[in-house]
Amino acid sequence: MQINMRNMNKVNGDSILILIMNANWIVQLIMLGLFIASLISWSYIFRNIRLLNNIKKADMQFEERFWSGIDITLLYQEQHQNPDAYSGIAKIFFCGFKAFSKLSGQIQTPEVIMESVQQMMRVAVSREQKQLDRYIPYLATLGSTAPYVGLLGTVIGVMNAFRGLAITQQATIAAVAPGIAEALIATAIGLFAAIPAVIAYNRFSSRIEQQLISYEVFSEEFSGILHRRLHLNLEKAEGNKSVSI
């Protein structure tokens, strides 16, 4: 029984390959395009999985250091040596504290300083979002269009099958079955390309949304810390002036 099943699977695989090789050149081109698009989508899926996992791990490590009580000035100085090596929450922190350090030494009101700091952090969040969304549009496009492209191949294959049937003397199922089968293979390849892309798109969209929420939460918390630090600096400055007088 096992030998028969193996032989049957081999025959089925060979039959599918023969159908693809004997298909109309337009249908073959559609199949090839869908297959290449599927390979590209899988490469993007694995890249995005690795990217999101690395960012999540880096964010957890940075937040652990940030909330450990370390001096944020020291943390900023560490990042200032190589700012391009950081991303995610660490990058948002760097941009926010950079603007804070630059404006704190100028004659500015606390409101103006904090507004500039928050603006820089919003810009950093937007850049991080752009990085996270890098491969998402392709998955969305493939997931929505691949079934229709496969259906186009099916329609062309069915048309060719019936056209071939019209010139035969005997209209039998055996005469039209190979053409219908090769047409349906195009639909199957389209679904094979679309289903993983749709699942990955939904999963990545959810994870990216959660990541952006964590960015917004950190930005608000960090703004509060900088706001308190700014008022403490102003109070110390006013105290030094009163002592000197």
Image: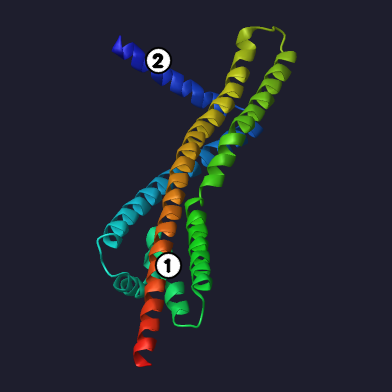
Considering the image in quadrants, where does the C terminus appear?
bottom left
Task: Determine which of the numbered discs, if any, sits on residue 105 in the image.
Answer: none
Rendered image quadrant of residue 72: bottom left
* Crowding at mark 2 (Cα within 10 Å: few <14, some 14-19, many 20+): few
Residue farthest to the bottom?
245
Q: Position of residue 117 (x, y in %)?
A: 48, 68
Residue 235 or 64: which is nearer the viewer? Answer: 235
Badge 1 is on which residue?
227
Q: Is residue 177 visible?
A: yes
The three-letter amino acid code for the residue at tag 1 is His
> Callout 1: few (<14), some (14-19), or many (20+) C-alpha neighbours within 10 Å?
some
Q: Is residue 44 visible?
A: no
Residue 125: give x, y in percent of width and height: 48, 58
Q: Which amino acid does label 2 sit on?
A: Met
Q: Nearer the viewer, mark 2 or mark 1?
A: 1
Q: Which residue is at 43% across, 18% downward?
A: 11
Q: Position of residue 243 (x, y in %)?
A: 34, 89
Q: As rendered, which of 23 and 56 lies closer to the eye?
A: 56
Q: Mark 2 points at which residue?
A: 8
Q: What element carries label 2?
A: helix
Identify the colour scheme used: rainbow
Residue 237, placed above or below residue 222: below
Residue occupying the point 60% across, 10% down: 174
The residue at the point 46 percent across, 42 percent down is: 204
